[in-house]
Amino acid sequence: MSNNRNDILKVIGIVSMTFDHIGMLLFPQIFWFRVVGRIAFPLFAYHIAVGVKYTRSIFKYALRMLIFGILAQPIYTLVVGTGLNVMFDLFFGIVVIGLLRQETKHYSALAVAVAFVWAICNKGYGGYGVACVLAFYYMDKDVKAASILFVAVSIMTAFLSPRYTQGFAVFALPFILLKPNLRVRMPKYFFYGYYPAHLLIIHFIGIKFL
């Protein structure tokens, strides 16, 4: 991991996410929209893992994610109807890492408890989301092990949950490991605004034209 900021993976994630939501909301019969969309969450999880590594305050980082998640939720509920938006998955990933970084048995047990509760609540990406953030957080220590963990949980999720397309998330791994040689900088809070805005736009397109 490097703290030399490059948002190219975030851009790819945003494009992928947009395809995914267009498929979900406008063209559910077109399978490949959802397949393309499966690489989005791992790319965002990787960015969160990098952010946790280099943030000056993990508490403020988690709080910001939680606040924007809460702000985006009314639009998410309007458009999608049920569940919690992806920012809550990323928030709990940050929380679990923050607890594990305390390096005590009590905090480690609490981290496991938080991950378990989020997993059984089955909101958003659940345990899969936390596992992705954790895998990418430890990637600079053991790339092979982190990659295997990510691939394993993606395939397991595809087989054991309604998210049968989640196995295609493994195609995010080459982007993460190789990183396209193109430097891009985005406004710091762009994603937080784009996420609810694009859902709302797609929703109104569906109402007006479909």
Image (cartoon, grey):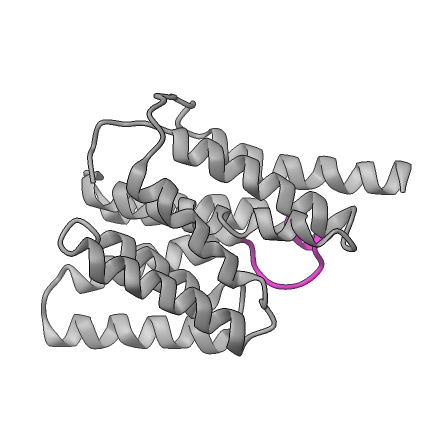
Q: Quadrant of the C terminus?
A: top right
Residue in view at x 40 percent, y 29 percent: 8
Asked whether residue 83 is drawn in magenta, I would say yes
Q: Is residue 47 above or below residue 129?
A: above
Residue 63 position, x and y percent, is 36, 48
Q: Position of residue 144 (x, y in %)?
A: 21, 58
> In which image quadrant can residue 161 be found?
bottom right
Classify the position of the N terminus by image quarter.
top left
Number of numbered callouts drawn: 0
Residue 66: image location, x then y, percent: 43, 50
| Residue 138 in view here | no
Query: Closest to the observer: 98 or 48?
Result: 48
Whole-percent x and y of residue 156?
A: 45, 73
Pick whichever, 35 or 206, lies toward us.
Answer: 35
Residue range highlighted in magenta: 75-85
57 relative position to 125: left or right: left
Q: Which of 157 and 76 lies nearest the eye of the viewer?
A: 157
Task: Give the quarter of the image for residue 185.
Answer: top left
Would you place residue 122 above or below residue 167 in this image? below
Q: Residue furthest left?
A: 104
* Residue drawn 37% across the image and 76% down it: 116
Question: At x 63% / y 47%, what residue is drawn?
Answer: 20
